[in-house]
Structures are given as C-alpha cells and as structure tokens.
Image: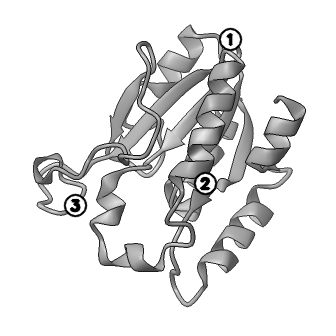
C-alpha cells in the first residue's frame, strides 16, 4: 500500500449550519462514496477525518452531537482510522503523518468539505511533507464566501493547487484510469 485516501470533514456538522442551504453539492456523499469504493478496491488506506471544536458549544463541538460522518457515507471498515482534528488541515493536530509513514504511503488523494479551506490546506501541507497529492475536485464542495460563488472558489482552488501542490482529478478520471 503506497496510496491513501483522506476524507476530510464530510460530517453532519456542516448540515447543521445555515450555510448548508448554499452548499455547491449537497449530495457530496455520492462522489466521496465512489472514491472510497475505488480506493478500497485498489487496496489503498482510507482515512476519515472529522473537524472538532471542543467547548465551543457550536456545531463542531462534539458535545452537540453533530461531529460524526454523514449518514449516507460508506461506514469505515476495521483498520480505517477515524481522526479528529482541531486545525484546518488534517495533519497538524492528528497523528495522520505517523499513520501514513507506518503504512508506507507516498501518495494522497484528498476530498471533502470546504474545498478552499480544510481540503485545500490538507493538500498543501501534504505536498510540503513530500507526498504526491491528487486533489479530487468533484469529491469536494463548499459554499459562497467573501463575494465569490462556490464555483468560483472551486475554480480558484484548482488553479492555485494545479501543478504546484497537487494533480487535479475527478472521480470519473480516477475510475477510468483505475488510479
């Protein structure tokens, strides 16, 4: 195993926020599930990451009950880590790098919620740590931010990551190439 899929923040917390009504792809679980099945079929490690803000009393506070994978997602299999983070990227406040090193992983596929925030940041940090990164763009989603539409944010994220921090791919491209 030299590849891993990192599923970032595809969690009920986002549906509990008012902004969910403006999310670009409310059916984000569908492409993520396709990607999870593809990764598993290829013998890749699947790592699930949940964002938490303990003590905040908001939707990311584990005490509020929303910090859990979206109901329609594939369930983690035995041996698939479920990590909880408190930073924007999946590395800084977890043992993700240790898990990847122990598993001999050299390539990451990343997907999840908030294309430009936690998913992009995870891709950038992963690249800085020496991983080959595949940013699976249609298995990410976001909502409008700062006067930009969700589509504009996704386009911008692809542009700034492409050929610097990550290869940009779609689920269909990965399925076609069998990764």
> What label does residue 59 carry, if any?
3
**What is the secondary structure assignment of the residue under circle 1?**
loop
Identify which residue is drawn at 69% across, 30% down. Answer: 38
Tell me if mark 1 has few (under 14), some (14-19) or many (20+) residues whose alpha carbon lies within 10 angstroms of its own. Answer: few
Q: Look at the image and tell me in which quarter the N terminus lies.
A: top right
Of badges 1 and 2, nearer the viewer stands 1
Report the label total. Answer: 3
Q: Which residue is mark 2?
A: 120
Whether residue 166 appears in this view of the structure is no
- Element type at marker 2? helix
Q: Which residue is mark 1?
A: 1
Q: Position of residue 58 (x, y in %)?
A: 17, 63
Q: Is residue 141 left or right of residue 72?
A: right
- Picture coordinates of residue 91 (x, y %)? 48, 36
Element under label 3?
loop
Q: Which mark is residue 138?
A: none
- The residue under the point 67% across, 68% down is 154
């Amino acid at each position: 195993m030299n590849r891993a899929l990192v599923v970032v923040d595809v969690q009920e917390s986002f549906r509990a926020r008012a902004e969910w009504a403006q999310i670009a792809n409310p059916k984000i679980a569908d492409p993520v599930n396709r990607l999870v099945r593809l990764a598993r079929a290829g013998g890749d490690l699947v790592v699930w990451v949940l964002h938490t803000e303990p003590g905040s009393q908001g939707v990311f506070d584990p005490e509020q009950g929303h910090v859990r994978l979206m109901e329609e997602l594939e369930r983690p299999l035995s041996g698939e880590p479920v990590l909880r983070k408190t930073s924007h990227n999946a590395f800084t406040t977890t043992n993700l790098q240790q898990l990847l090193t122990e598993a001999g992983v050299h390539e990451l596929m990343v997907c999840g919620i908030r294309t430009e925030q936690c998913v992009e940041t995870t891709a950038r940090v992963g690249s800085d740590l020496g991983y080959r990164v595949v940013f699976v763009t249609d298995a990410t989603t976001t909502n409008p931010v700062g006067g930009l539409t969700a589509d504009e944010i996704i386009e911008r994220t692809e542009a700034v990551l492409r050929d610097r921090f990550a290869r940009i791919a779609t689920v269909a491209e990965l399925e076609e190439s069998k990764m």
